[in-house]
Amino acid sequence: MSDYKKFVPDVEKMFGKLTFAGASKETSRRVNGRVKILEREYNLFSSKLLSENVEVRIPGVAGVKTFEYEGEVRLVNPYLVAEGYAIENRGYVNYVLLADDILKA
């Protein structure tokens, strides 16, 4: 991930209070015959982005996160990256929120 240009957001200004909504998906890869979890994605609710979930990806080494539903959480070292993609010769950007960990607030 170090190849990306990162933007470090002011989480409080951008998202307000973040609460836990649940786990989304895991990205894994087979390494030396074993499955290694590369990253996990979680859904969070934002007090400012009321109509949208906030998806955050954390490294697999951070472990599985389980919090009370709608329990307040905080992100450790959050940053945004842009991932580009094309559909029928048109370019689009998806902004991805990453963090080192998710902790109970």
Image (cartoon, helix red, strand yellow):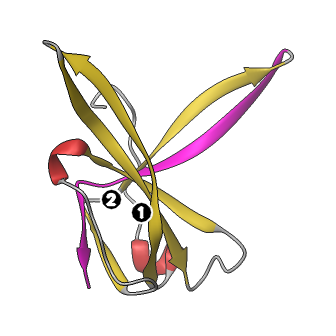
Q: Residues within 10 Å of mark 2 (few under 14, many from 20)?
A: many
Query: Mark 2 and mark 1 in contact (Cβ < 8 Å)?
Result: yes
Q: Which mark is residue 79?
A: none
Residue type at tag 2: Pro
Q: Residue at x 60, y 82 (%)?
A: 48
Q: Which of 29/5 is in front?
A: 29
Q: Position of residue 4 (x, y in %)?
A: 38, 31
Residue type at tag 1: Pro
The magenta stretch is: 89-105
Q: Quadrant of the C terminus?
A: bottom left
* Image: 87 above or below 83: above
* Magenta-colored stretch includes residue 52: no
* Image: 65 above or below 28: below
Q: Is residue 34 left or right of residue 56?
A: left
- Residue that numbered label 2 is attached to: 78
Q: Residue at x 31, y 41 (%)?
A: 39
Please tell me in which quadrant of the rendered image residue 64 appears.
Answer: bottom left
Q: Could you say whether the residue bearing mark 2 is in a helix, strand or loop?
A: loop
* Front: mark 1 or 2: 2
Main SS class of the magenta portion in the image: strand
Q: Position of residue 43 (x, y in %)?
A: 49, 64
* Image: 39 above or below 47: above
* Magenta-colored stretch includes residue 99: yes
| C-alpha separation, residue under disc 1 versus residue under disc 2 | 7 Å
Please tell me in which quadrant of the rendered image residue 77 appears.
Answer: bottom left
* Image: 90 above or below 46: above
Q: Which mark is residue 9?
A: 1
Q: Residues within 10 Å of mark 1 (few under 14, many from 20)?
A: some
Q: Residue at x 56, y 46 (%)?
A: 95
Q: Is residue 52 left or right of residue 73?
A: right
